[in-house]
Image (spheres, rainbow, N blue to C red):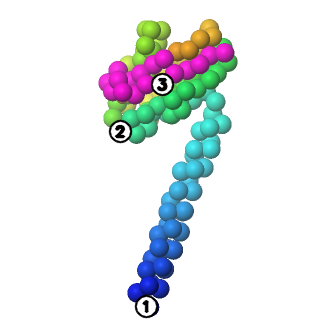
């Protein structure tokens, strides 16, 4: 009986701790979603992986990882060079189209900017 109660309390405590830990992350997530012209590199992924902007928009990427990443256009239109942690790169999209890009260091990291 005592074991069961303390077990429940532990689960409650863990749930509360997870809620507190998750809260600031979800707030940041919402803030990012409203930044319609920015992409982050985090946990070896671009986020968002697909971003739609209007022609004439400057898109800014920021590397949040401790490892370097690049923003490298598949068709050669833009290329950031290696970005260290917190480094930013900005490119202005003038014409409409779908612009695929990847990290040349980790080519599994693929994403696209859609310009309307
Ligand atoms: Cu990378």
Image quarter of the C terminus: top right
Residue 2 is marked as 1
Q: Is residue 83 visible?
A: no
Q: Residue at x 40, y 87 (%)?
A: 3
Whether residue 40 is in magenta: the answer is no
Q: Residue at x 43, y 8 (%)?
A: 76
Residue 66 is marked as 2
Image quarter of the N terminus: bottom left
Quarter where residue 86 is shown: top left
Residue 111 is marked as 3
Distance between the alpha carbons at the discs numbered 1 and 3 = 53 Å
Judged from the image, the quadrant occupied by ligand 1 is top left
Q: In this orientation, which residue lies closer to the viewer: 70 or 15? A: 15
Q: Residue at x 62, y 16 (%)?
A: 115
Q: Reading the chain from its start, which is encountered first: label 2 or label 1?
A: 1
Contact between marks 1 and 3 (CB within 8 A): the answer is no
Q: Secondary structure at mark 1?
A: helix
Distance between the alpha carbons at the discs numbered 2 and 3 = 20 Å
Decide: is 45 above or below 75. Answer: below
Crowd tier of the residue under label 1, counting other residues whose Cα lies within 10 Å: few below 14, some 14–19, many 20 or above: few
* Extent of the magenta region: 100-116
Q: Reading the chain from its start, which is encountered first: label 1 or label 3?
A: 1
């Amino acid at each position: 009986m005592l074991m069961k109660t303390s077990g429940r309390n532990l689960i409650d405590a863990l749930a509360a701790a997870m809620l507190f830990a998750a809260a600031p992350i979800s707030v940041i997530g919402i803030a990012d979603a409203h930044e319609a012209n920015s992409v982050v590199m985090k946990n070896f992924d671009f986020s968002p992986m697909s971003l739609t902007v209007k022609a004439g928009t400057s898109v800014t990427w920021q590397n949040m990882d401790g490892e370097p990443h690049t923003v490298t256009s598949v068709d050669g239109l833009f290329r950031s060079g290696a970005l260290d942690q917190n480094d930013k790169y900005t490119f202005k999209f003038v014409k409409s189209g779908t612009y695929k890009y990847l990290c040349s260091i980790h080519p599994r990291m693929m994403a696209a900017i859609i310009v309307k």
